[in-house]
Amino acid sequence: MGYSISPQIKDILQCPTCLGQLEVDQERNELVCQEENSHAFPIQHGIPSFVKSKEIAPEDAKWVFEYDEKAEEYDEAIKKYMHG
Ligand SMILES: [Zn+2]
């Protein structure tokens, strides 16, 4: 399943590290900086995440992980609801 980012939004996105232009890498599901390839940001549920995992405190990371798990369940529940 592919999430995509609308061109309008992509055009205003800038790399938070160097302000370079960001391009969507569909295969990696990341926004990749055109100035510096190592500046890459994962797209989660169609929303670019500009927070690097290692910059999140362990106690917050656990919470983020649990939230992601719940979000998956939520998505599944919505699908079941939508398709009966
Ligand atoms: Zn950059």
Image (cartoon, rainbow, N blue to C red):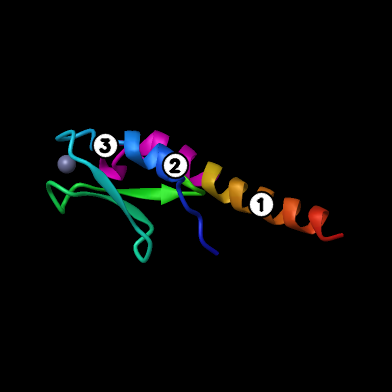
* Relative side of 62 to 16, left or right: right
| Chain-order first, disc 1 or disc 2 | 2
Where is mark 2, residue-wise? Answer: 62
Which stretch is magenta?
49-66
Q: Quadrant of ligand 1?
A: top left
Q: Position of residue 6 (x, y in %)?
A: 46, 45
**Residue at 12% across, 46% down:** 35
Q: Where residue 11 appears, x then y in whole percent?
A: 33, 39
Kindly identify the amino acid type of the residue bearing the numbered disc 1: Asp
Q: Quadrant of residue 12?
A: top left
Residue nearer the viewer, 41 or 59: 41
Marks 2 and 3, how far apart at CA:
13 Å
Residue 57 seen in this snapshot: no
Q: Residue 16, position in %: x, y?
A: 23, 33
Q: Residue at x 46, y 40 (%)?
A: 64
In this rendering, position of residue 72 left or right of residue 64: right
Contact check, label 1 and label 2, Cβ < 8 Å: no
Give 79 or 54, whichever is nearer the viewer.
79
Question: Magenta region's main secondary structure?
Answer: helix
Residues packed near mark 3 inside 10 Å, few (<14), some (14 to 19) or many (20 plus): few
Q: Nearer the viewer, mark 1 or mark 2?
A: 1
Numbered mark located on residue 75 in the image? 1
81 versus 20 height, above or below: below
Could you say which is closer to the camera, residue 75 or residue 67?
75
Lateral position of residue 11 relative to residue 21, left or right = right
First reached walking from the N terminus: tag 3 or tag 1: 3
Task: Tell me, for residue 55, which label it has, or none.
Answer: 3
- Label 3 is placed on what type of residue? Glu
